[in-house]
Image (tube, helix red, strand yellow):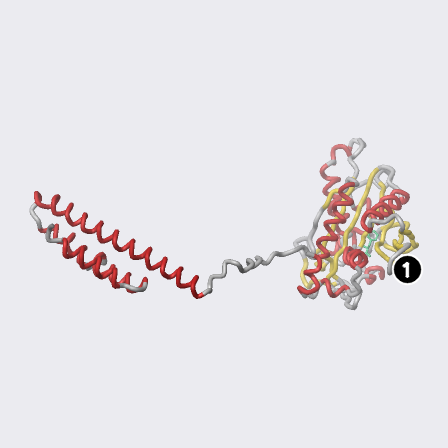
């Protein structure tokens, strides 16, 4: 027995008396805290002669260890008692089903665009994205839509009251067609050497999905909507190829061969000839009704020139379709606005 034994006994008794973790922490402070009794003992070492320090220090440390051991034992006992209490009170029901973590899902329009990308991907089409804030030249002029030409008002464009660095007015792109020009020009630049030497250039085959904007709003039009542009340019890509590609796409997209396509003559400044593409299902709720799904046509020679290519050598078709419309048809949704209201009761159905 040494003079530290009462200290250890006091601590053990104090810890045993503590009935809550808070009381136990108070008791701990009285021994191991900054001015606790054990800490005071350690501080007192400083005034001892050098020879006495070591044995005295060892004694104090042994006492400290005993006290820490008692503290930990009491902590564990209190925790165990608390667990028992909760179990007895029934507040911990291990039989309850777990709570599911909330998971997100893809939006039906995103699912539709993914589907379009997969189908065109299987036909060798690249996927490109471009800016939603466009300039006049890409949105209109390059697409054979001269300034002040009435055809510009076919689209009720949102203009931005700002010009870009090149002095061109900006707009919220009213269609994805500017992407034809951006992609084709980048392609032409990449193959400039081959083009200059009149060597064959790899074909352009691309789709460009994305958001588009027009001043328009009702059950089938939203000021923000989606389009997906398609472009195939080669040395002999014709309207016939457009028909094949688009028919194939529709059959794959709607998973039916019982579908008729109609290419209805139309006008776009950037294609000649131009067509609206309608489809009709042989079965189902929409059976027999012509539904417009795209605009399309052979790219106009002026536009091919703006791609930086020679219209005598590089020809092909373009189309622009509406993924929102395709999603409505595929899922049987009658109001376009449902897609953009953000109502989870609607959106969760597509998880
Ligand atoms: N850009 C046209 C539209 O928004 C669609 C289109 C694209 C037509 C490509 C022909 C070729 O209506």
Left of 178 or right of it: where is 281? right
How packed mark 1 is, by other alpha carbons closer than 10 Å (few <14, some 14-19, many 20 or more), is: few
Residue 173: x %, y % from top left: 73, 57
Residue nearer the viewer, 328 or 101: 101
When asked about the image quadrant of residue 74, the answer is bottom left
Quarter of the picture for ligand 1? bottom right
In the structure shown, which secondary structural element does the residue marked by tag 1 occupy?
loop
Left of 191 or right of it: where is 282? right
Residue 54: x %, y % from top left: 12, 43
Residue in view at x 72 percent, y 45 percent: 127
Residue nearer the viewer, 39 or 1: 1
Left of 299 or right of it: where is 130? left
Left of 306 or right of it: where is 286? right
Q: Name the residue under label 1.
A: 289
The furthest residue to the bottom: 218
**Where is 163 relative to 234, above or below?**
below
**Where is 54 relative to 34, above or below?**
above
The furthest residue to the front: 88
Residue 46: x %, y % from top left: 12, 50
On the rendered image, what quadrant is the C terminus found in? bottom right
Residue nearer the viewer, 169 or 299: 299
Residue in view at x 88 percent, y 42 percent: 241
Residue 39: x %, y % from top left: 18, 55
């Amino acid at each position: 027995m040494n003079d530290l034994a009462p200290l250890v006994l006091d601590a053990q008794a104090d810890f045993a008396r503590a009935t809550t973790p808070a009381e136990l922490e108070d008791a701990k402070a009285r021994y191991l805290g900054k001015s606790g009794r054990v800490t005071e003992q350690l501080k007192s070492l400083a005034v001892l002669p050098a020879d006495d320090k070591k044995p005295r220090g060892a004694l104090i440390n042994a006492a400290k260890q005993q006290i820490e051991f008692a503290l930990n034992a009491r902590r564990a006992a209190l925790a165990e008692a608390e667990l028992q209490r909760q179990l007895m009170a029934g507040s911990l029901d291990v039989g309850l089903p777990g709570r599911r973590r909330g998971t997100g899902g893809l939006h039906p329009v995103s699912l539709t665009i993914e589907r379009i990308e997969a189908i065109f991907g299987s036909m060798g089409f690249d996927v490109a994205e471009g800016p939603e804030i466009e300039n006049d030249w890409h949105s209109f002029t390059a697409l054979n839509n001269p300034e002040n030409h009435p055809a510009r008002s076919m689209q009720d464009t949102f203009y931005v009251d700002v010009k870009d660095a090149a002095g061109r007015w900006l707009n919220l792109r009213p269609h994805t067609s500017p992407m034809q020009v951006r992609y084709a020009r980048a392609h032409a630049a990449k193959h400039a050497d081959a083009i200059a030497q009149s060597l064959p250039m790899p074909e352009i085959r691309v789709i460009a999905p994305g958001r588009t904007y027009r001043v328009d709003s009702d059950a089938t039009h939203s000021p923000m909507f989606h389009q997906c542009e398609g472009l195939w340019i080669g040395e002999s890509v014709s309207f016939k190829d457009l028909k094949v590609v688009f028919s194939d796409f529709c059959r794959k997209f709607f998973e039916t061969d019982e579908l008729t396509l109609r290419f209805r003559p139309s006008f776009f400044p950037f294609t000649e000839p131009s067509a609206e593409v309608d489809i009709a299902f042989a079965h189902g709720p929409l059976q027999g009704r012509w539904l417009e799904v795209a605009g399309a046509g052979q790219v106009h020679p002026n536009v091919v020139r703006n791609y930086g290519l020679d219209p005598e050598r590089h020809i092909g078709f373009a189309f622009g379709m509406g993924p929102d419309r395709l999603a409505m048809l595929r899922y049987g949704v009658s109001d376009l606005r449902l897609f953009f209201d953000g109502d989870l009761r609607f959106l969760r159905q597509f998880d």
